Amino acid sequence: MIPRYSRQEMTSIWEPESRFQIWLDIEVLACEAQADLGVIPEEAAQAVRERGAFEIERIDEIERETRHDVIAFLTNVAEYVGEPARFVHQGMTSSDVLDTCLSVQLTRAADVLIADIDGLLDALKRRAYEHKDTVCIGRSHGIHAEPTTFGLKLAGAYAEFSRNRERLVTARHEVATCKISGAVGTFANIDPKVESYVAEKLGLHPEPVSTQVIPRDRHAAFFAALGIVASSIERLATEIRHLQRTEVREAQEYFSEGQKGSSAMPHKKNPILTENLTGLARVVRAAVTPALENVALWHERDISHSSVERMFGPDATVTLDFALVRLTSVIDRLVVYPENMQRNLDALGGVIHSQRVLLALTQAGVSREDAYAAVQDNAMQAVDGDASFLDLLRKDKRVTQALDESELEALFDLGHHTKYVDTIFARVFEE
């Protein structure tokens, strides 16, 4: 977790203080459930709740000798609790604590990420409506295609992040499981009611069947969802980067007073935030393959997943949180240039209406092959700068024999391309 790309709301979930507190909560709740079942004395459970505590430096000191973090933690807790500590961790195994803790951390992280997406959706919706009718050129393969609106671009991003929100909600539910089933998951030395009690208190649901660990397909699905969100961030960031290019300049990141773009060239306004987002997306996606590889553990468990999760659990969630908040700020303050959009629409002499001419010719009785040849011939000349597309069509008998002047001119109306924008917006925003 690099401070430069971290927010405290997310990093606090992964800090040692938070992790050990969740461990202690799990042990306290398990003791309460055990006491209710008559397995341990009521006063022992009460002592664990009242006197249970830990000290991080002391845990680290013990672990240097034991080489086992959970044992080090339990030893430190026992130093605070005293004699009743012999009832702590009754019938449990380390993964009961570790995996249930990870579930708590991931669900809390998911809650932060879902809130982040809600903020981004608000910004996208506001800017989409602001530019619902701001006509710009659409591009395929990086080449001018047909007109669209900048609002539709943002509405598309809104729809994509709405799907991402649903993915995160699903991933949160899938990973929100509790495992207090003992060694190899058979409940041989602990009652399943303990797991149900702990799960309810922590806002989780019991793992239906576990081994010594919670099945890692759940975690793989969680990090895959994060990877998809990251890809959506990169997609939108890349679009903004392209639109900010000097030759395009249809939109650009906000450039604040006193900001500098280059140490050598004072004129530069670089898309540094969206370039940064592109890089951060790669970091988040880097967690996906290890999460998939963690699914295949030996028999009832091995520890090959542990070191991986301790690294990419914090890194992926912290990075994605930061990226979502940064992208929200970019969208919120994005500078849009409608006049440059119009300039680019006009740049190729009207060839962006070529499909309309093609279709009109076929409707007028010209074969598609002949119509395509006539339209392409004139479009290529217009692109080369010989004349406007409309003027060239007016001089081509293959065209004028089928379409009169008024029919030709009507085919160059931009409004034709935006007539269903309201319909699309109603679909996207469910209005």
Image (spheres, helix red, strand yellow):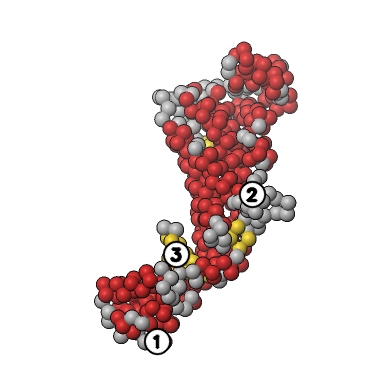
As drawn, the label of residue 365 is none
Looking at the image, is mark 1 or mark 2 earlier in the sequence? 2
Closest to the observer, 403 or 417: 403
What type is the residue that disc 1 sits on?
Glu
Q: Is residue 18 left or right of residue 400?
A: right
Q: Nearer the viewer, mark 1 or mark 2?
A: 2
Return the residue found at the far top: 65
As drawn, the label of residue 265 is 2
Label 1: element kind: helix
What type is the residue that disc 3 sits on?
His
Residue depicted at 41% across the width and 73% down the height: 386
Looking at the image, is mark 1 or mark 3 earlier in the sequence? 3
Q: Position of residue 360 (x, y in %)?
A: 35, 79
Residue depicted at 57% across the width and 36% down the height: 315
Q: Position of residue 425 (x, y in %)?
A: 52, 67
Residue identifier under label 3: 144
Closest to the observer, 41 or 223: 223
Looking at the image, is mark 2 or mark 3 earlier in the sequence? 3
Quarter of the figure with the N terminus? top right
Instruction: Kindly tell me whether residue 413 is visible in this rendering.
Output: yes
Q: Position of residue 271 (x, y in %)?
A: 59, 51
Residue identifier under label 1: 405
